[in-house]
Amino acid sequence: MRTFTFGSAAAAAAAVSLALLATGCSGSDGSASAGASGGASHAGPVSMEFWGWAPGYDKITAQWNAAHPDTKVTFKQIPSGAKGGYDQMTNAITAGKAPCLAQVTYNDIPSMLVKNALMDITSYSSGDTGRYLDWTVAASSAGGKVYGIPVDTGPMALYYRTDLFKKFGIAKPPATWDEYAADAAKVQAADPSVAFGTAPQDAYDMAALTWQTGKSWFGTQGSSWQVSIDNPGTQQVAKFWQDLKAKKQVMNNGNAWDPNFDKASEAGKVMTFVNAAWAAPGIKGDLKDLSGKWAVAPMPTWTAGDKTSSNSGGSATSVLSGCKTPKEAVEFAAFLSSDPDAVSTGITVGGLYPASKAGLNNPLLSKGDPYFGGQKIYDVFKESSANIPTTWVVGPTFGQVEADYSDAIGKSTYAQATTTVQQKTIDKIKSLGLSVTGG
Amino acid sequence: MSTQTAPSPARPRPRSGAGPSRRYRRRTSLNAAGFLVPFGVLFTAMMLAPIGYALYQSFFKVHRQGLFGGAQTTQFAGFDNFVDALHDGDFMGSLGRVALLGVLQVPLMLGLALLLALLLDSRSARFRKTFRLTFFLPYALPGAIAAVMWSFLLVKDLSPFTGPLAAIGIHTDFLSAGWVPASIGNMITWGWTGYNMLIIYSALQTVPGEVIEAATLDNCTGWRLAWHVKIPLVRPALVLTTVFSIIGTAQLYTEPAVLAAARIPGASNKFSPIMNTTLNASQADPNLAAAESVLLALVTLVLSFGFLKFTQRRTADA
């Protein structure tokens, strides 16, 4: 009989744990459904959820709630899209418990469309699109329909260390990629342990660098995709960085926000990195001790005198499939993107460089930043923003391109990686059932 | 190990003589059913339902057209997803990769675990408890933490190993593409040897004293005692740890995922089969991911049960 008491104890324990599991589930369900179900009654107060990861969105949501007591938005911080955020969204849509609003990067709007995750908001927003930079509106639309309200952009620039430039006798930041390579060689000759910059790590870097060449990874012809990842622009970028990487003049390991990069920066072993406006708060937070030593210069160009820059990242706010209050959702998205106070919060907290045309005149963007030695860094980004080629087309499988590029860059040269990713992308688009014509 | 004790329910069923009354029997079976309910509910909810759902999903496919999919419909696809899975080079490559890793790493790890268990069990062993705990300690560390720790120990500029190796002329980067599989094998070995050792050691504890005594009287001691007496007697434990290791290797995820997330250039985000299914699931093809998961489960099942059957037959032959 002893075993029986033992067994019942175990059964009781199992029952308790089951109960715990059940409450655990219903707990999270309850909070998730609050947003979706709240919108059922249009006449009364509306409540919606907003999922995102950009720093500052929580504060902007609080600003909205203070001004709109009848339309309550609850912000939920999720992992960035590539780190599982989009999976959370699509899972929630499948479960019928999706938030009304979500952050989606321009890179991922087409792939979220392929997953049937975004709502067509043309009828709520069409009068509004003129308020945002044209290319961001294009990047948030597909087939003439609007799927997101542009929030920010990532105009590129060169971040560089003024103290190390002085130490190595480099008078001014490189204006062209040729000068960049020459400076890198000069630094290596003086001290081989110091890297001039960082090598591209992944598809985000490769895309931003290719965007500058005026070439695009994707195009459309009729209702068919054209994949052109392996284009002369990408190969030009590939060749340039492969050369620097082979000579060990750039860090092979570590991007601007990486612990490796931070460690090298603190030791004075890396002098520059090329990245977007939103990287500024990152280095200010991570490398507090280096205040006054960083500065920002225009992104080096391929031809002297040319000002062509590039973009990396940037997000829109989309309304997810199944939202019952899309009108209110779009109103919130417009507030997030264009309300002057919201734009100010975005700039200070998240380094979000506004996609709204009026936002570009925000007074915060003409202030000097003590971290950058008092430099008005946003003057550089403003000029960069005005010189972003409008030729770039985002493809329907960015997640796959990203995964395959990161994988291939680790195994082979940039040129080989590019060829591999080109083929894998065509295969992937085909396997999704979309139409595609090769290179 | 609960898995060991679970499938052996005591079944008192006296056939002859005055058996228990029918009423009593019905009551006991009701009792038994009552006790099985919690297990049954959990097993159905956490095991059968997800497996069934994956199996169901693996026979469907989303049909899309044009640039963004158009009006998407989900249709029955027969074995199409399985055919696609077999043609998915990344997935098949990862299966091969973990198979190779398993063939090389599992015997090494279990050999080491057996050796440590025998040493602990030997008569001359001292500080048994301390050593047992020390060997077991890595297992107590969560896998992700261990992987992060090892990634710091192996990354080129921080590693305490690369420096001394370079001093004797060996220049290696343990996290370069060629070394990553070996480094991952090292992490698994570090984390799981102690765990396996403990299972084997417990089995060694149950070897009857008189057997050892008889062997010793016949002048069979030391390594000969271990080889001819102890190891054959702990065979079931070795079989069990091998099966666990086969399953564990097939389900490899934490170590390569941590390395890939750290953007270590040599670490692939498609290293293991589960990483591939995860990627496919988030890249708009959950049906293919389901088919690949089913395939992975089948391969694991065949390998672990195949190994069990193989060893059982050999035991029967012997």
Image (cartoon, coloured by chain):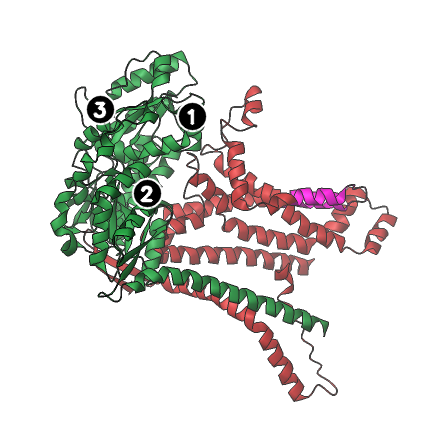
Residue A1 visible (yes or no): yes
Depth check: give the residue in front, A171 or A409.
A171
Residue B115 visible, this orientation: no
B118 is within the stretch colored magenta: yes
Report crowding for label 2: few under 14, some 14 to 19, many 20 or more residues within 10 A (C-alpha).
many
Where disc 3 sits, the SS reads: loop
Q: Which chain is red?
A: B
Q: CA distance from mark 3 to mark 1?
A: 30 Å
- Tell which of A365 and B106 is nearer to you: A365
Tell me which chain the residue with mark 1 is part of: A
User: Which one is earlier in the sequence, the residue at label 2 or at label 3?
Assistant: 2
Amino acid type at circle 1 is Asp
Q: What's drawn in magenta, residue-wise?
A: B110-136
Mark with earlier residue (1, 2): 2
Q: Label 1 to label 2, Cα distance in Å?
A: 23 Å
A404 and B238: which one is in front? A404
Gap in angstroms between the C-alphas marked 2 and 3: 32 Å
In the shown orientation, is residue A220 left or right of residue B144?
left
Identify the residue under disc 1: A289
Q: Colour of chain A?
A: green
The residue singled out by tag 3 in the image is: A301
Say whether residue B243 is magenta: no
Mark number displayed over residue A56: 2
Question: Label 3 neighbourhood size at 10 Å, few (<14), some (14-19), many (20+)?
Answer: many
